[in-house]
Image (spheres, rainbow, N blue to C red):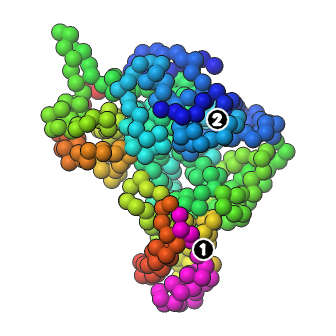
Amino acid sequence: MTIRMTINGREYETDAHPMMPLLDVLRESCRLTGTKYGCGEGECGACTVIMNDELVMSCMVPVMQAGGAEIETVEGLARVAENGEEILHPVQQAFLECGGAQCGICTPGMVMAGVHHLRHPDRAPGGLREALEGNLCRCTGYSAIFRAMEQAAKTGHPE
Amino acid sequence: MIASNPVRYRAYVPVGVEEALEQKAAIENLLPIAGGTEVMVLLNEGLLAPCPVQSLHQLAGDWRGIRESDGSLIIGALATYTDVRHHPVVCERYPLLVESAKVTGALQIQNRGTLVGNIVNGSPAADTVPALFVYEANIRLLSSSGERVISINEFYTGYRKTILRSDELISEIILPAPPDGARHYYRKVGTRAAQAISKVVVAGIRTDHETKLAWGSVGPTTLRALKTEKAIAGGASPEEAAVVLMEELAPMDDIRSTRNYRLAVSRNLVMDFIHKTKE
């Protein structure tokens, strides 16, 4: 079964087994290793990506269910300006400025959850803490992460 | 990364309900999945015995909706926790479902997991099932030879055992209107507030004449505390009700908690329930 999907605006095709987790396809077949493997059981959020505008844990999506889907990973956030310079997404930029990453393993998932929250604040009526509830940081760098998200919310998003 | 070889799980993707039911009847050991949030954990950890898998995602058009019908609310088998949490009628009439969906995993899980998955998985720690018990939900079971509608209170027969036949799929949850003027109560007690599995979970509703209380993680299945309900409706004090409750629960020691802790928490929760739902 050939599975087609759009990842960061590019068409991808894979012959991966239908029950292969989307995460493994992203990392191994598409070589998009920004998305991390953390726990494999939906607890840590390191593998978080956006699928059809919804936040999902890619380790828990059998790739057959991603057929025809639009996937966004951390690699797709930055833009390239006319002069060729890479412009980070405001959430990435804020993480950088506020020290929102320590070891960095939770960062891609945390950033994706943050980006999704800025787009759809109504999805987490409890606010930022609820929006990031599914993303664990083992370095316990939460305060810096929350500061980064508050800053990103002020600078707005370019989408 | 994944610890199983996915090739050992042959995938079936029915495009319609009829085909899904035919497959369910014909293929031995076929494991249906909706969002896969339960099955993928086992797969990733290498704990799922090889079996054919039936992914129901193509049935979303038929089965994902939430709609009103004759005073009842129908929740399709593929409706996610997110769908339930944000549905205006659920928010207005079934607040215990909103509460319980909100504490099931995080947003990422709620976007994929389904209420029917929570039911059929059969865990006594399921967070939404106590709410469905007190609302006296019915579930519709379909097979290629017919259908039956049964009360969720009669669905479980033992630890992770249900009356679901191997040729059946659950198509929907049917929620009768809750009693007028009901006060609602929901508490989940886990190791931490978010992303934890319950040590004790309770859902309750109370009117001036009637009390309903359902408990999770304190027995082999989710259970109604019928004697305690009667005692509370009859005017028992919080302390008296707690004594009755202690005889109705059968918690165990396990990886998440101990029998004694669960009993102590349940005792406190029933007293809290009585205070908070007084009027």
| Residue A114 disc label | none
The image shows residue A65 at horizontal and vertical percentages of 56, 30
Mark 2 touches mark 1? (CB < 8 Å): no
Q: Which residues are magenta?
A: B227-254
In the image, residue B258 sits, relative to residue A31, either above or below, namely below
Farthest left residue? A97
Q: Residue at position x 52%, y 33% from top?
A: B2
Q: Which quadrant of the figure has residue A109?
A: top left
Is residue B228 found inside the magenta-colored segment of the image? yes
User: Residue tagged by mark 1?
Assistant: B250
Kindly report the secondary structure that dominates the magenta region of the rendered protein. helix
Task: Using the image as rendered, state which of residue A84 and residue B150 is in the foreground.
Answer: A84
Q: Amino acid at mark 2?
A: Ser
In the image, residue A2 sits, relative to residue B165, either above or below, namely above
Parent chain of label 2: B
The image shows residue B213 at horizontal and vertical percentages of 56, 73
Q: Is residue A6 visible?
A: no
| Residue B55 disc label | 2
At mark 1, the secondary structure is loop
Q: Residue at position x 56%, y 81% from top?
A: B245
Farthest top residue? A83
Horizontal side of B8 relative to A27 (left or right) equals: right
